[in-house]
Amino acid sequence: MTVTALEPDDYLMLSGIQHFAFCPRQWALIHVEQQWKENVLTTEGNDVHRMVDDPQFDETRGDKRVVRSMPLVSEALRVRGTADMVEFRRQEQPSSATVVLEGRAGYWSVIPVEYKRGKPKRDDRDALQLCAQAICLEEMLGVSISEGEIFYHEVRKREKIELTSGLRERVAKITVEMTKMHAESRTPKAVYKTHCRQCSLVSLCQPKWSSRGAKSAAAYVEQWIGGHRQ
């Protein structure tokens, strides 16, 4: 199994796909303006990911090989990142959905597994991140991946995700928009919605205020300072 070498300066973060799907402004504040702030939800999420954050973990038991913290990259999407876990499951026959692993007999299907702190969401942002991971693996390993799994810590079970053409098209569209926005160093105007209350950046974003004028956190700070000088 050969993993493509990463060139960090040339790729956007794969994890940003979930941020962008949740809110393009949140993505820009984090990935363009380099703003970040922890809250209870992000702290809990970090704790969950520490369960599988072990780049040295590579274990084979019977017909299953488990690799944690696997580096990912896609030339097509121009993203890089890390898969929480990738499972290789032994199959009897070779196909477009299997790979040959060095030093291991047989043919192996590839299943990306993402870990999340909460429970299944009503929107598709978790599925989009998982789909992007699968696209990276397909490109790196020359394999077809039809499904992945998300482990939700709150309900303590995995959910199978079918990696449909619709999800793949959404991933491609989002990465194009991310690349364009990053190249332009542009942060979109805020649109206040109920999900803003869940965002760790709500105090920096000020969505109720900035939706009426400011287009970036920097602009908000400048206008706030200017107003208090008068």
Image (spheres, rainbow, N blue to C red):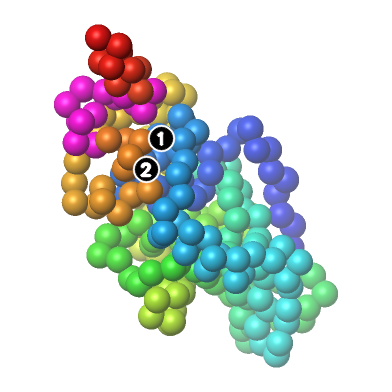
Residue on which the image places disc 1? 29
Residues marked 1 and 2 touching at CB (< 8 Å) = yes
- Residues in magenta? 207-220
Q: Residue at x 26, y 23 (%)?
A: 214
Quarter of image, res 97? bottom right
Q: Position of residue 100 (x, y in %)?
A: 71, 71
Q: Residue at x 53, y 44 (%)?
A: 13
Q: Which quarter of the image is occupied by the C terminus? A: top left
Q: Tell whether 107 sits left or right of 125.
A: right
Camera-side residue of 194 and 141: 194
In this rendering, the answer to whether 98 lies above or below 82 is below
Q: Dot 1 lies on which element?
A: helix
Question: Is there any visible trace of residue 26 in the rendered image?
Answer: yes
Which of the two residues, 151 or 77, is positioned nearer the viewer here?
A: 151
State whether residue 188 is above or below residue 2.
above
Residue 193: percent from the left, percent from the top?
A: 18, 46
Q: Earlier in the sequence, mark 1 or mark 2?
A: 1
Is 199 on the left or on the right of 55, as rendered? left
Q: Residue at x 40, y 34 (%)?
A: 28
Does residue 67 show up magenta in the picture?
Answer: no
Look at the image and tell me whether residue 131 can be seen: no
Which disc number belongs to residue 143? none
Q: Which residue is mark 2?
A: 201
Picture quarter with the N terminus: bottom right
Q: Amino acid at mark 2?
A: Leu
